[in-house]
């Protein structure tokens, strides 16, 4: 009996001790300086900053559209050889999903929950939806079918292996998202004080609204070959909603000494002397007496070695510029160098590393110039009302004036702008080609967009890369980039379903809106 009583008393003592220890347990095990939630504004900002095209878009996008070229093989292999370099094709995927999409999907979910609880966050939610649409456009335009409706839902819904959506379904939702989110923005609603895109420019909500509708026009025009009726409908909605009105509305990532442009740091670091201006792009500017040429290009005349390329000593004289032709690697280009009368491959024209290629150079993502050119095309197609000539001219002027935002002496003289526009009016029967040639120019350094519009419009008409080791068998140009090898490891079943619908996972398979 004594033993039983002793046991009972001991049990009570133990329970009491553990109960006492449990008091304050949560507080004791919570890090007082560690975040337990994230302000969606910071998630938005992280996604915006992450969207800046870096050095990687030189490997494929800008090279495919004949703006830039490198003869060097190895890590730089890509569009220069028309070969599948999986270490490079995965960059957009990893860049987008690992940071931008993860933050945006989580931020949207957080804001939707807050609004259900009565919070006034409609503007911030709408802005995240607009930027999420932008990020997904880059991804689906690069790869075709991608995880969309189930993307970044691992934490929120426990979806570790997301299914792939068809690109048609993705674009249907992107169009709806952009229309709804843009319409929901209101200057009388919540302001977002720490947002990095427009808060310092002023008229923040108005500018986001214009960006949303300008993106809607861009998305609508993607459908021009596969669903002209839907493209026309959404183009009308975009124009009625209100497009960008000046370069102040540009969606741009700004860089400074504390936050540097990765393209510039590479071009001014270990990759100096690696990339050159493509000959077709150079010849197009020279043949059109384009006043942007001396702002963009520099040539280290007579450079025999990489060491002879001393920044600041090159010539920007248009008469000195010589673009590098495609079709060669660093082992085969010497014969072409000799034919061109140059000292070495380092004697070809580069993008000026102190101006457009500077570490402090901005990244332009969606611009007034691009928007006006798309608007001009929509007018020409009879989809919307307006003055196509005025929109076309505004698009050209806007890009020339936009160059002033780069470091150094990058202003295009007003007289040169007026003379260029006067010498290049729209001509009946060639409007679509002229507009999209200017879009090609306007999207210089924005490889994602230049390549997407090239596939969508078919312009400019340029020669395919003649490199003899090309992996392309049925297409003249690369139509998409291949999925990361990691997807074959962790999400193979869903990836294989997408490949079965879309076609082989190679550089030639056309995505949904890219029809011949």
Image (cartoon, helix red, strand yellow):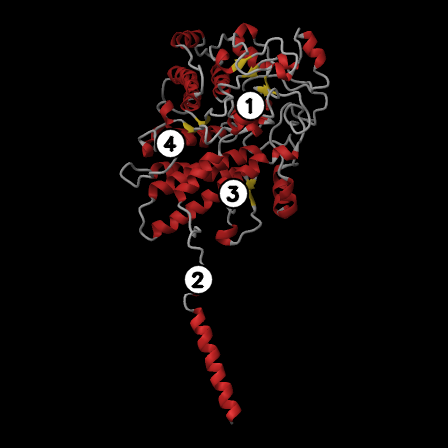
Q: Is residue 319 visible?
A: yes
The residue at which mark 4 appears reads as 237
Tell me the crowding category of disc 2: few under 14, some 14 to 19, or many 20 or more residues within 10 angstroms, Cα based. few
Tell me the crowding category of disc 4: few under 14, some 14 to 19, or many 20 or more residues within 10 angstroms, Cα based. some
Q: Secondary structure at mark 2?
A: helix
The percent coordinates of residue 392 (x first, y second) are 42, 17
Q: In the displayed structure, would residue 80 be above or below residue 190? A: above
Q: Nearer the viewer, residue 250 or 423?
A: 250
Q: Secondary structure at mark 4?
A: helix
Q: Nearer the viewer, residue 267 or 478?
A: 267
Using the numbered discs, state the Cα–Cα distance from disc 4 to disc 3 in whole angstroms.
24 Å
Judged by depth in the image, the label closer to the viewer, 2 or 4, is 2
The residue at which mark 1 appears reads as 268
Judged by depth in the image, the label closer to the viewer, 2 or 3, is 2
- Residue ID at (70%, 24%): 470
The residue at which mark 2 appears reads as 28
Of the numbered discs 2 and 4, the one sitting upstream in the chain is 2
Q: In the displayed structure, would residue 290 be above or below residue 270? A: above
**Number of marks in picture:** 4
Q: Secondary structure at mark 3?
A: loop
Check residue 483 in the rendering and tell me which mark sits there, or answer none.
none
The percent coordinates of residue 290 (x first, y second) are 48, 10
The residue at which mark 3 appears reads as 148
Using the numbered discs, state the Cα–Cα distance from disc 2 to disc 4 in whole angstroms.
55 Å
Of the numbered discs 4 and 1, the one sitting upstream in the chain is 4
The percent coordinates of residue 400 (x first, y second) are 43, 16
Q: Is residue 516 visible?
A: no
Circle 2/circle 4 CB separation < 8 Å: no
Using the numbered discs, state the Cα–Cα distance from disc 2 to disc 3 in whole angstroms.
40 Å
Using the numbered discs, state the Cα–Cα distance from disc 4 to disc 1 in whole angstroms.
44 Å
Of the numbered discs 2 and 3, the one sitting upstream in the chain is 2
């Amino acid at each position: 009996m004594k033993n039983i009583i002793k046991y009972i008393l001991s049990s009570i003592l133990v329970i009491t001790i553990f109960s006492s220890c449990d008091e304050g347990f949560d507080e004791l095990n919570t890090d007082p300086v560690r975040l337990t939630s994230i302000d969606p504004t910071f998630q938005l900002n992280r996604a915006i900053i992450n969207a800046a095209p870096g050095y990687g878009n030189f490997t494929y996008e800008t090279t495919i559209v004949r703006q830039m070229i490198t003869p060097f093989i190895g890590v730089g292999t890509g569009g220069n050889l028309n070969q599948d370099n999986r270490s490079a094709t995965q960059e957009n995927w990893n860049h987008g999903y690992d940071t931008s999409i993860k933050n945006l999907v989580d931020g949207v979910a957080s804001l939707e929950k807050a609004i259900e609880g009565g919070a006034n966050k409609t503007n911030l939610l709408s802005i995240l939806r607009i930027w999420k649409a932008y990020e997904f456009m880059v991804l689906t335009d690069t790869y075709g079918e991608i995880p969309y409706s189930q993307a970044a839902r691992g934490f929120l819904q426990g979806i570790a292996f997301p299914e792939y959506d068809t690109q048609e379904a993705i674009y249907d939702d992107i169009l709806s998202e952009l229309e709804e989110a843009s319409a929901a923005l209101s200057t009388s609603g919540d302001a977002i004080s720490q947002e990095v895109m427009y808060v310092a420019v002023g008229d923040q909500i108005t500018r986001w609204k214009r960006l949303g509708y300008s993106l809607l026009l861009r998305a609508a025009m993607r459908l021009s070959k596969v669903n002209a009726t839907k493209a026309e409908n959404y183009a009308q909605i975009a124009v009625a909603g209100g497009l960008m009105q000046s370069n102040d509305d540009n969606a741009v990532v700004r860089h400074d000494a504390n936050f540097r442009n990765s393209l510039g740091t590479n071009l001014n670091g270990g990759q100096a002397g690696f990339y050159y201006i493509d000959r077709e792009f150079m010849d197009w500017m020279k043949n059109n007496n384009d006043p942007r040429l001396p702002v963009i290009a520099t040539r280290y005349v007579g450079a025999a070695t990489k060491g002879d390329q001393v920044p600041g000593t090159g010539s920007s004289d248009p008469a000195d510029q010589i673009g590098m032709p495609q079709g060669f690697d660093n082992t085969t280009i010497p014969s072409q160098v000799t034919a061109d009368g140059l000292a070495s491959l380092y004697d070809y024209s580069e993008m000026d590393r102190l101006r457009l290629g500077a570490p402090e150079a901005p990244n332009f993502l969606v611009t007034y110039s691009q928007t006006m050119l798309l608007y001009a095309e929509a007018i020409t197609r009879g989809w919307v009302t307006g003055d196509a000539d005025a929109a076309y001219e505004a698009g050209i002027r806007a890009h020339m004036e936009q160059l002033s935002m780069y470091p150094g002496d990058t202003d295009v003289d007003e007289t040169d702008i007026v003379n260029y526009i006067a010498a290049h009016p729209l001509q009946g029967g060639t409007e679509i080609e002229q507009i999209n040639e200017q879009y090609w120019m306007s999207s210089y350094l924005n490889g994602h967009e230049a390549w997407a519009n090239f596939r969508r419009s078919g312009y400019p008409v340029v020669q395919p890369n003649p490199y003899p080791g090309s992996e392309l068998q049925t297409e003249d140009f690369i139509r998409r980039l291949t999925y990361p090898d990691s997807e074959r490891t962790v999400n193979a079943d869903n990836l294989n379903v997408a490949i079965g619908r879309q076609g082989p996972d190679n550089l030639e398979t056309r995505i949904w809106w890219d029809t011949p």
